[in-house]
Image (cartoon, rainbow, N blue to C red):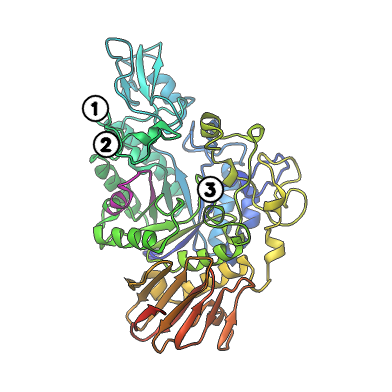
């Protein structure tokens, strides 16, 4: 289906932690194939698969040493083909992660590049001379700590690495590098993948003149945990030349049927503007997402500002929103306190799946999964070691998917690479499957509701002016619309809706009745008019022939 990605819902699989099939404690492709029915039954349109390529795993696969094969940890190319065929049979698209900005230092091209300054690939990575005093060419800092430059004694030059020293950056100013990387993408398109998630999509180009970054304008009185956050990265990333390469990616995808790309924008204060810039028109990325909804902010003003900011900047662009992924603390933990996790989880499902644009769900999100408390001796993530204890790294959101209440949660028969702890074990698929009001069933019903309503997938959006903690907006597809209202607080709110008739995902599943309770915490959809009570962390959604006013009751 052409433009299947518009309004789509993609399920992110962090493969190492999804399902182990051979007892080595690491998830793999045969395990994913076994569990694809779970994703299809949930009601998703696509699967985003974390990197599966050969890698030393210094950054858990985001350090690629071969772009056209499968790491033996995960299986074989035949296993990949079997997974892809099964996904397609279930009606699921498959998007794979592409790490183009950098390779592993174990990649043979880097070995060749560092061998001399005159070899055929000498200019395939970013090399620069030291300053007269021997220091690095400029002040650029690595996301993972320390300078973004590493000295190489063979070439007697520095090379650029925006992440680990074992992740040298490609030189995108060299057209041969671009051509080769596009060729690796063609390999997977020919194999049948439906598109790509582009890692660090704004990191491809660097400033040719290697100008130092200015300081970030900060209001904090003490230094950041990570010094990288104290720079405004004007010159080390998000360069204007990036647009040209994005056009080349789009042209490649457009030469195939029904393929799409979503870019990860790793940017701070300009993230929404960059998302808009990278997706405007018909010749750039199909979709982009940033970390703007992956932080601690949980206010109506924040969500409204991000959505309106995007569509103001790019009315013809297309965002992809997410509340959790493999790089951030799970949103149920970020946004809830003791005893409110289920309420926040259900509200988040309704809110995220009502937003204009496309959506990414992260594995376990549909269970209301919480962040795992990782001890220092359990760490595997490089930033966790670098910035402990104020930042514990990303292991806490990457612990294994929990399928049942057995000791390892049904993930493995061996010892898992990260621990499955009791708080996470209690939120498993088996205990929520078919249970009315469970977080899992809420996601299933909300996904069905979204799929059944074009207004939620591709309709226009108009926000209603209401004070905190209520977020409200109309979604309209031209044949009536849907009014979406969300109470983002742990307290009850009284809201006046003139002549309102509220409906919800339960009705989409064939249920009827004036009041449809979907959860013990008070998540409810009700038929009402006049004054309406919004229970703590409760959404209400109603069909409406035309927008009608709403206001907080005095």
* Disc 2: which residue: 234
**Separation of residues labelled 3 and 2 (CA atoms):** 27 Å
Q: Identify which residue is drawn at 57% across, 37% down.
A: 71
Q: Quadrant of residue 57?
A: top right
**Separation of residues labelled 2 and 1 (CA atoms):** 9 Å
Q: Earlier in the sequence, mark 3 or mark 1?
A: 1
The secondary structure type at the circle numbered 3 is: loop
* Disc 1: which residue: 211
Give the image location of residue 207, x and y in percent. Answer: 25, 31
The one of 27 and 320 positioned closer to us in this rendering? 320
Could you tell whether 434 is left or right of 113 in the image? right
Quarter of the picture containing the N terminus is bottom left
The one of 25 and 194 positioned closer to us in this rendering? 25
**Separation of residues labelled 3 and 1 (CA atoms):** 33 Å
The image shows residue 526, relative to residue 37, as above or below, that is below
The crowding category of the residue bearing disc 2, from other C-alpha atoms within 10 Å (few below 14, some 14 to 19, many at least 20), is some
The crowding category of the residue bearing disc 3, from other C-alpha atoms within 10 Å (few below 14, some 14 to 19, many at least 20), is many
Q: Identify which residue is drawn at 61% across, 41% down.
A: 74
The image shows residue 471, relative to residue 420, as above or below, that is below
Q: Identify which residue is drawn at 37% across, 78% down.
A: 551
Q: Earlier in the sequence, mark 3 or mark 2?
A: 2
The secondary structure type at the circle numbered 1 is: loop
Mark sitting on residue 329: 3
Number of numbered callouts drawn: 3
Q: Are marks 2 and 1 in contact (CB under 8 Å)?
A: yes
- Residue range (magenta): 262-276
- Res 90 visible: no
Q: Is residue 326 magenta?
A: no
């Amino acid at each position: 289906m052409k433009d299947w990605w518009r309004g789509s819902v993609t399920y992110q699989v962090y493969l190492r932690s999804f399902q182990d099939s051979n007892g080595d404690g690491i998830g793999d492709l045969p395990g994913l194939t076994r569990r694809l029915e779970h994703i299809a039954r949930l009601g998703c349109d696509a699967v985003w698969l974390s990197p599966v390529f050969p890698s030393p795993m210094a950054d858990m696969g985001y350090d690629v040493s071969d772009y056209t094969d499968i790491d033996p940890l995960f299986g074989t190319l035949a296993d990949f083909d079997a997974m892809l065929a099964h996904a397609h049979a279930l009606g699921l698209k498959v998007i794979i992660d592409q790490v183009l900005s950098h390779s592993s230092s174990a990649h043979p091209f880097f070995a060749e590049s560092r061998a001399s300054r005159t070899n055929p690939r000498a200019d395939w990575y970013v090399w620069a001379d030291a300053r007269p005093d021997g220091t690095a060419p400029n002040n650029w800092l690595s996301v993972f700590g320390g300078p973004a430059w590493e000295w190489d004694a063979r070439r007697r030059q520095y090379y650029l690495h925006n992440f680990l020293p074992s992740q040298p950056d490609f030189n995108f100013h060299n057209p041969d590098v671009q051509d080769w990387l596009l060729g690796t993408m063609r390999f997977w398109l020919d194999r049948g993948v439906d598109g790509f998630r582009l890692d660090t999509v704004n990191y491809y180009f660097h400033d040719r003149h290697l100008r130092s970054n200015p300081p970030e304008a900060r209001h904090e009185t003490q230094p950041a945990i990570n010094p990288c956050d104290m720079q405004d990265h004007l010159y080390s990333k998000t360069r204007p030349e990036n647009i040209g390469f994005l056009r080349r990616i789009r042209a490649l995808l457009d030469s195939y049927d029904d393929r799409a790309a979503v870019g990860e924008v790793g940017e701070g204060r300009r993230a929404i503007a960059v998302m808009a810039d990278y997706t405007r028109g018909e010749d750039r990325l199909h979709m982009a997402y940033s970390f703007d909804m992956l932080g601690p902010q949980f206010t109506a003003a924040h969500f409204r500002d991000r959505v309106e900011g995007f569509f103001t900047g790019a009315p013809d662009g297309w965002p992809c929103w997410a509340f959790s992924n493999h790089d951030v603390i799970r949103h149920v933990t970020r946004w809830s306190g003791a005893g409110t996790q289920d309420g926040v989880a259900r509200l988040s499902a309704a809110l995220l799946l009502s937003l204009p644009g496309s959506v990414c769900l992260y594995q376990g999100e549909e269970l209301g999964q919480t962040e795992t408390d990782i001890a220092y001796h359990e760490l595997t993530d490089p930033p966790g070691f670098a910035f402990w204890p104020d930042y514990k790294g990303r292991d806490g959101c990457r612990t294994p998917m929990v399928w049942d209440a057995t000791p390892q949660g049904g993930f493995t028969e061996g010892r898992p690479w990260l621990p499955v702890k009791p708080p996470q074990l209690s939120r498993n698929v088996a205990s929520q499957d078919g249970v009315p009001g469970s977080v899992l069933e809420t996601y299933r019903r909300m996904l069905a509701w979204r799929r059944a309503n074009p207004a939620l997938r591709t309709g226009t959006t108009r926000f209603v002016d209401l004070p905190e903690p209520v977020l409200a907006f109309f979604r309209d597809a031209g044949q009536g619309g849907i009014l979406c209202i969300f109470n983002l607080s742990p307290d009850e709110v009284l809201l006046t809706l003139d002549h309102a008739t509220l409906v919800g995902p339960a009705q989409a599943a064939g249920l009827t009745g004036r009041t449809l309770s979907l959860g013990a915490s008070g998540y409810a959809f009700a038929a009402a008019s006049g004054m309406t009570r919004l229970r703590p962390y409760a959404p209400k959604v109603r069909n409406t022939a035309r927008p009608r006013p709403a206001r907080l009751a005095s």
